[in-house]
Image (tube, rainbow, N blue to C red):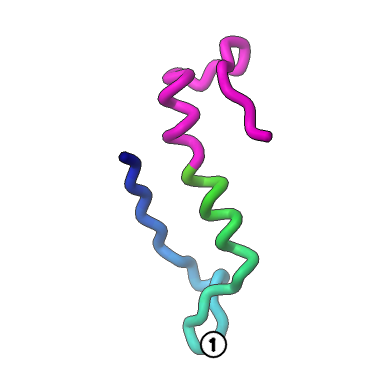
Amino acid sequence: MINETVRPRFCETDGLGHINNTVVAQWFEGARDPIFKWFTPDLNLNAWKLILA
């Protein structure tokens, strides 16, 4: 199981503190690094074993 804690930045919210819906996809992109490290621990692109499709 992977746990990733996301702390919203000021620029990702509006004046009422609501999260902008466009940043959710960016949070998912940031959470994929631990998954890539399962397959290629040193993240060496020459030995990459996983693609994102």
Question: Would residue 7 be found to the left or right of residue 22 on screen?
Answer: left
Question: Residue at coordinates 55% horizontally, 70% vertically from top-left?
Answer: 12
Q: Disc 1 on helix, strand or loop?
A: loop
Query: Measured along the vertical axis of the image, is residue 43 above or below residue 26?
Result: above
Q: Residue furthest top?
A: 47
Q: Position of residue 20 (x, y in %)?
A: 59, 73
**1 over 11 or under it: above or below:** above
With 3 as the anchor, is 17 left or right in this view?
A: right
Highlighted magenta segment, given as a residue range: 32-53
Where residue 8 appears, as percent x and y from the top left, is 45, 66
For badge 1, the amino acid type reads Gly
Q: Residue at x 40, y 62 (%)?
A: 7
Q: Residues within 10 Å of mark 1 (few under 14, many from 20)?
A: few
Residue bearing mark 1: 15
Quadrant of image for the C terminus: top right
Horizontal and vertical percent position of residue 35: 45, 33
Residue 51 placement: quadrant: top right
Relative to the observer, which residue lies in front, 47 or 49? 49
Whether 20 is among the magenta residues is no
Residue 44 pos. (x, y %): 54, 16
Does the magenta segment cover residue 43?
yes
Residue at 47% from the left image edge and 45% from the top image edge: 31
| Residue 37 lies in quadrant | top left
**Is 24 situated left or right of 7 in this image?**
right
Near-viewer residue (8 or 37): 37
**Residue at (48%, 82%) from the top-left corner?**
17
